Image: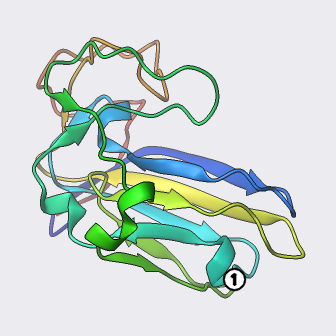
Amino acid sequence: MQSNKVNLFHEHVLIKEKGSKKRTPWHQDQGYYCVQGRDNVSIWIPLDKIDINSSMEFILGSHKWDKIFLPTKFKGNDYEHKDKEFEKIPDIENNRKDYEIISYECELGDAIAFNYATIHAAYGNNSNNRRRAFSVRFTGDDARYIKRKGEMSPPFPNINLKKNEVLDSETFPVLISS
């Protein structure tokens, strides 16, 4: 991030049971979050060996497209299109040849770091074991709070920040400051 300050934004565990055919759809994390700014990083840490055909996929350079895409729900109905700056994500899956898609086989101890604006997806779990990963998100110097008009995930219902305020708070603690 090349930031002088790092805030913890949020973390969670992702699990795909062995034999799961369900793909995680192409999406970009930026539109889900109450954060605006380019200084951010998601770190995806596998807790099991991940074969390339069960891993995440990324569109190389998509974080530089300067677009925010409408969030995609992984189950159920799509998010309402309330934020005017959001665009509908392109049909990447049916036009894969038009994109530079990369993926990684992961061993225990590996981690994949990517910007919130990076478009990514994940295969179903074609391996012989459960696919577990710990994901943690951080923000940097230019991160500011934004209240989206539509649904946000995670929702953070008790935030007392105003639009464009820095995230430094009990909810988003400063971990490093120089």
Mark 1 closeness class: few <14, some 14–19, many ≥20 residues within 10 Å: some
Q: Residue 111 in the image: x percent, y percent?
A: 52, 77
| 45 to the left or right of 166 | right
Find residue 100 and report its image quarter: bottom left
Q: Amino acid at mark 1?
A: Asp
| 138 to the left or right of 73 | left
Q: Quadrant of the C terminus?
A: bottom left
Residue at image location 63% in from the left, 60% down from the top = 134
Q: Which residue is mark 1?
A: 51
In this rendering, the answer to whether 22 lies above or below 171 is below
Q: Secondary structure at mark 1?
A: loop
Q: Residue 11 in the image: x percent, y percent?
A: 54, 47
In this rendering, the answer to whether 19 lies above or below 150 is below
Q: Residue 59 in the image: x percent, y percent?
A: 32, 67
Q: Residue 123 in the image: x percent, y percent?
A: 63, 63
Q: Quadrant of the N terminus?
A: bottom left
| 72 to the left or right of 60 | right
Taking depth in this image into account, of 7 and 81 the one nearest to the observer is 81
Residue at image location 49% in from the left, 29% down from the top = 154
In this rendering, the answer to whether 170 lies above or below 134 is above
Taking depth in this image into account, of 42 and 167 the one nearest to the observer is 42
